[in-house]
Image: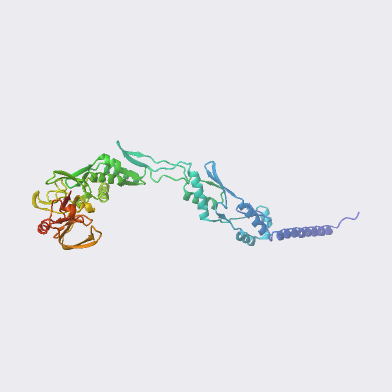
Amino acid sequence: MEGVSPVNSKKKLTVGIAAAVVILAGIYGGVAVHYSHRYLPHTNVLGVKISGQTEAEANRTLTKRFSALKYKLNDGKKTVATASGTDLGIRRSFTKTLSSLDQQQNQWAWLGHALGLGGTSAKVDPVINTKQLHAYTKALATKENGHRRASKDANMSFNKSGLQVSKEVYGNQFDVNKLDSTIVRAIRADKQTVQLNQTYIKPAVTTRSAQFTKAKTQLAKLAQETGRVTVENHSETITKDDLYQWLGYNHGAITVDANGVKNFVKSMGAKYDTYGKERTFNSTKRGTVKVPGGTYGWSIQQTRTADEVVKHIKAGKDFTVKAITSGSGYHADGTDIGNTYVEVDLQNQHEYYYKDGKLALDSDIVSGKPSAGDASPVGVDFVWSKQTNATLRGVGQSGENYATPVKYWMPIDYTGVGLHDAPWQPKFGGDWYLSHGSNGCINNPPSFMPKLYAAVAVGTPVIVF
């Protein structure tokens, strides 16, 4: 039997190996060509496999995957809400990333990728519409916070026993801004579950804060102050109970109840003000009479005085505040009208001027004509101006305009009524005023008026009754 030549066997083996190499190279090259426009094995974007897909196919895969993506917003183990990327204002474009991956990959390295010796992972940063996200979180917080417990700042206030402290309360209502930042962090970290228990609104003030401790010490000190508000020879004391009612603490700051202080000052005004109030007057001929308020008198300026009291309370020292007043007429002896004044008795048609309690001048007068609706207005008024050679203007009792010159003019109210000389009157006193009365002014005899004008100073009370 004729045997196979060793040379021929070796040749056949060589040819076989070469053929196998060619075949394998062809296969390898074919696979490489396949991956020339497709992504290599173990290629993913944001954890989504796109191996073997073209750029267009991968774009569709990723777009579909992330458009359907839902985010769970959890508070502990409870899911509060589930939102889509659209709800949260999230937008991703994969085109640029996919193109870059395609250009960077080496198609001839497909085998290493297939064997797990290589791989590519890519991220795509989301574009977040912050306005849309904020609108979502604001709506969520509004809905949720209605049935959640609110946090409360530590507080303190006074009762009859003194200063009482209320500890802070930690609630579970959501802070919209914290919701925004927490969700954004989770999205950028490619998380689909967002924990919200770190987004609660926390108390701004706690009993452990240095600010609270300092305010507590200061508040206790303020409550120990003694204060007074004076007006002339009167004084009202601010009691500890008053301070307990007015002092407080709010949002980290010591407060003084301005309305409470104003009510305190208002009560002083009701007690001591004289402006616009009825007076009891001891008249010359008619004894004690009641006279309504007029232009004369004074009153406490309540707002300005209250502001001064608040300022002194906050200063933390014992204090005395002098009430700020407006008007005139108050005397240190506690009287209002005093003992220097002009008395106009309309019933007796007579006028008196008292100086330091003594009668200095007096005269008959003619007052306003009652039947014409011009009766002289009654009230406690005062001489607020003096003028010589004045012209009095107005509308007469027959409806005519008048301009009457007088030598001496002393207005006593703000409607045009005053004391003046009246040379046109043939007589004064009695019942002459009933038929020949003035338009409301107090007519004085021409011989008497110069004396009265010289004697009576601006600011002198004029009691008309």
Asked whether 120 or 310 is in front, the reply is 310
Q: Is 391 drawn above or below residue 360 in the view shown?
A: below
Asked whether 65 or 395 is in front, the reply is 395
Q: Position of residue 241 (x, y in %)?
A: 27, 39
Q: Is residue 366 left or right of residue 33?
A: left
Asked whether 148 or 378 is in front, the reply is 378
Q: Position of residue 386 (x, y in %)?
A: 16, 59
Work out which quarter of the rendered image holds the N terminus and state it. bottom right
Q: How many marks?
A: 0
The residue sitting at 66% across, 60% down in the picture is 106
**Residue at the front extreme of this rendering:** 435
Q: Is residue 305 left or right of residue 249?
A: left
Can residue 402 be seen by looking at this rendering?
yes
Can residue 207 be seen by looking at this rendering?
no
The residue sitting at 80% across, 60% down in the picture is 15
Q: Is residue 63 left or right of residue 246?
A: right
Asked whether 73 or 417 is in front, the reply is 417
Q: Position of residue 110 (x, y in %)?
A: 68, 57
How was the colour assigned to the protein in this rendering?
rainbow
**Residue at the top extreme of this rendering:** 161
The residue sitting at 62% across, 59% down in the picture is 98
The residue sitting at 51% across, 47% down in the picture is 140
Q: Position of residue 414 (x, y in %)?
A: 22, 56
